[in-house]
């Protein structure tokens, strides 16, 4: 990952959920690779991230460079700045937490 949420105090990061639908498979691979640099992949085209405002802005610029706004869409849900992201998982997780603060 280019950015680790553990590099900054939690008060400076916001949680995001990001989903995408891309028309061209090559763009889909490029977008998936880009998002995996910043986010945790939960399912095929669904990601979670903890980002500072500056890193979030950089990610949005890089996403705009990859997607075709006529054929593709990326939906970003800001989830807030809480220290704990509440979620219910039914089934297996795609990633494991490596650090606990």
Image (cartoon, rainbow, N blue to C red):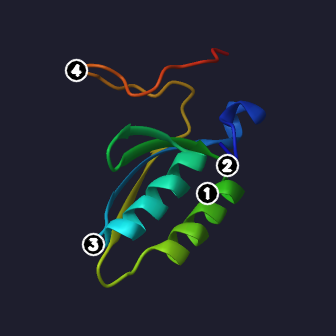
Name the residue that disc number 1 marks. 56
Mark closer to the observer (4, 2): 4
Name the residue that disc number 2 marks. 52
Q: What is the C-alpha distance between the residues marked 3 and 1?
A: 24 Å
Q: What is the C-alpha distance between the residues marked 4 and 1?
A: 28 Å
Q: In which quarter of the image is the C terminus?
A: top right
| Residue 89 horizontal/vertical position (percent) | 28, 22
Which of the marked residues, 2 or 3, is nearer the chain's N terminus? 3
| Residue 5 horizontal/vertical position (percent) | 67, 36
Up-down: is 44 above or below 76? Answer: above
Q: What is the C-alpha distance between the residues marked 2 and 3?
A: 29 Å
Which of the marked residues, 3 or 1, is nearer the chain's N terminus? 3
Which of the marked residues, 4 or 1, is nearer the chain's N terminus? 1
Residue 90: which numbered mark, if any?
A: 4
The reply to whether dot 2 and dot 3 touch (C-beta < 8 Å) is no
Q: Residue furthest front?
A: 26
Q: Residue furthest top?
A: 100
Q: What is the C-alpha distance between the residues marked 1 and 2?
A: 6 Å
Name the residue that disc number 3 marks. 23
Q: Which residue is drawn at 29% across and 80% down?
A: 71
The reply to whether dot 1 and dot 2 touch (C-beta < 8 Å) is yes
The reply to whether dot 4 and dot 2 touch (C-beta < 8 Å) is no
Q: Residue at x 69, y 37 (%)?
A: 4
Which of the marked residues, 3 or 4, is nearer the chain's N terminus? 3
């Amino acid at each position: 990952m280019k950015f680790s949420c553990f590099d900054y105090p939690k008060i400076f990061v916001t949680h995001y959920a990001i989903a995408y639908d891309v028309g061209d498979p090559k763009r889909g691979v490029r977008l998936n690779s880009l998002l995996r640099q910043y986010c945790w992949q939960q399912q095929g085209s669904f990601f979670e991230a903890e980002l500072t405002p500056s890193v979030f802005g950089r990610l949005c610029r890089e996403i705009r460079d990859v997607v075709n706004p006529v054929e593709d869409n990326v939906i970003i849900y800001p989830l807030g700045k809480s220290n704990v992201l509440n979620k219910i998982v039914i089934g297996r997780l795609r990633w494991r937490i490596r650090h606990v603060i």
